[in-house]
Image (cartoon, coloured by chain):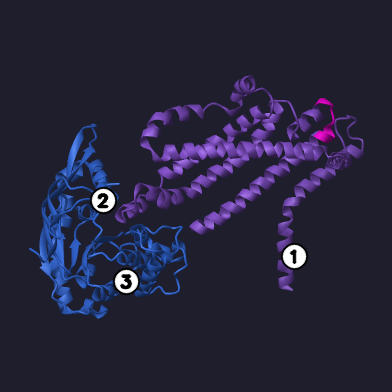
Chain colours: A purple, B blue
Amino acid sequence: MSSALAISHGSSRRYRGWVLPISVVALWWLASHMGWSQSGLLVSPEKVAATAWDQIASGKFWRAISASLTRNLSGFFIGTTLGLVLGCLLGLSHTFERLVGPSFNTFKQISLFAWIPLISVWFGLGDVAKVVFLSLAALVPVVVNTCDGLRNVPPNLLEVARVYRFSRWQTIVGVMLPAALPSIFTGLYLALVYSWLATIGAEYLLVSGEGIGNTLIDGSEHFMMDLVLFGMVVIGLVGWSLNALARIFERRMQRLYGIDPR
Amino acid sequence: MAEHKIVARDLSMEFQSLDETGQTERVPVLEGFDLQVREGEFLSILGPSGCGKSTFMNILAGLAHKTGGELLVDGQPLQGINRNQGVVFQGYALLPWRTVLDNIAVGLEIRGVGKAQRLETAREYLELVGLNGFASRYPHELSGGMRQRVAIARSLAYNPDVLLMDEPFAALDAQTRETLQSELLRIWGTHKKTIVFITHSLDEAIFLSDRVAVMTQRPGRIKEIFDIDLARPRLPELRNTQAFIHYRQRAWEALRDEVTDITREPAAAATHQNWQSIATLGGYRIGV
């Protein structure tokens, strides 16, 4: 009896998060069917579902999403690779830090979207420009966190390295990088989130070609709110999936390092 | 001369520190520090906090540099890190991403010992510190006492002549501490090393050592050294014997003046800020 109660209690807790979205959709359905609004801009949930099906079946959705994800991942890889190199140089070499550090700190203060005019003039509105923009978005958090992680290696671990006469290279590979790994990962995690946000931004601001951001623009230009809403749901789901993927890796690493997962 | 493993003569060490007015100030931490450590002995250095005992340890370990005097190990002036010395830190300092066994083997790995050989040696020392069955655990899965056992095994696996221990048991609870003290004596009995042990605990120093050196307050030097003529092996009950209590009395008398003098020193009261910086400087983090 009591265990049955406990199970039902547990499962009701698990589904609690669904209450709000289901109520909103129900209210929305009511609003569009009861004639509360005469505006053609309030479309019904079924219309959105039908559009979604049409987009998927016609292949438009797959073209858009694959264009967006390809862009996203290219920007992410280029940005994080450069970010890791720059972050390591800043974190490991005091000379390099003195030479480049102040410039980088100024550079990162420039709002990401302020780069758009420059990028569009230099690289046009195509994929090159978008990937450059995405790389910038991914670069900054990786540099900052990699550098921080390498700077904040616990002093007693560095003493161990000295006592056991690690060479400079052995200290970097055997102590500093592993000690900085959780922080470096935080940078990659942020880069993944930022680059997806920037993907949509780039598609919206550097309008040309295909992509999920362009689907949104299409929808809003033709007052097709069903298409806009479909695009928004897709963007949310992709963001959520990337986040979930990164969290799985983060948990694994925290367990290995003995950090209690939040 | 030959039987002296470590000789410190008129050793001194000072820091540059900023006072309230932003002026550079010289803070002497060690001054006129003389000490001879005999081959194979267990010597404890006892002193009030901030007296520079950890600074001496860091200089000996090659992690900090003396500013004056002479320091000889095996009759040779000490230069940099000495590979014949193992260091056990208060904070264990295990590498969190390595298993227990890989932590113990780290020194051998850097020395270029082959994998099979170093893991075999590591297992031997793992057994010595009584952690069989924990080889593939990670440091965060162990208690403080177990971590310190791993750290001791790591130092011993490197097979040093001298083991430098900087308040290794200070962070442990009383029971674990006493257990590890007995364990350390057992290990020292089988692997005759010279041990220099830093502590602020009278009981710990007397229970473990052949000789106890008491330091003055900062700037630190050795005030008094006395022999502890208690038979070995030493069992925990020893702590309740008359002889033990007698030694504790003597050590406390030597130490008491140094502890109470600190509060009477006018300069210390006047420049509180300096004290804080000295306290940090005197800690084992210096020299990084």
- Quadrant in the picture for the N terminus of chain A: bottom right
Residue B200, compared with residue A53, is above or below; it is below
Determine which residue is flagged by label 2: B63
Q: Nearer the viewer, residue A210 or B42?
A: A210
Residue B43, compared with residue A19, is above or below; it is below
| Amino acid type, residue under disc 1 in the picture | Ser
Determine which residue is flagged by label 1: A8
Determine which residue is flagged by label 3: B180
Residue A61 on image: x %, y %: 80, 39
Give SS at disc 3.
helix
Residue A253 on image: x %, y %: 54, 55
Residue range in magenta is A221-227
Q: Earlier in the sequence, mark 2 or mark 3?
A: 2
Give SS at disc 1.
helix
Residue at (81%, 30%) from the top-left corner?
A219
Q: Chain of mark 1?
A: A
Q: Nearer the viewer, residue A10 or A163?
A: A163
Callout count:
3
Residue at (53%, 42%) from the top-left corner?
A187
Q: Chain of mark 2?
A: B
Q: How many C-alpha atoms fall within 10 Å of the one at disc 3: few (<14), some, or many (≥20)?
A: many
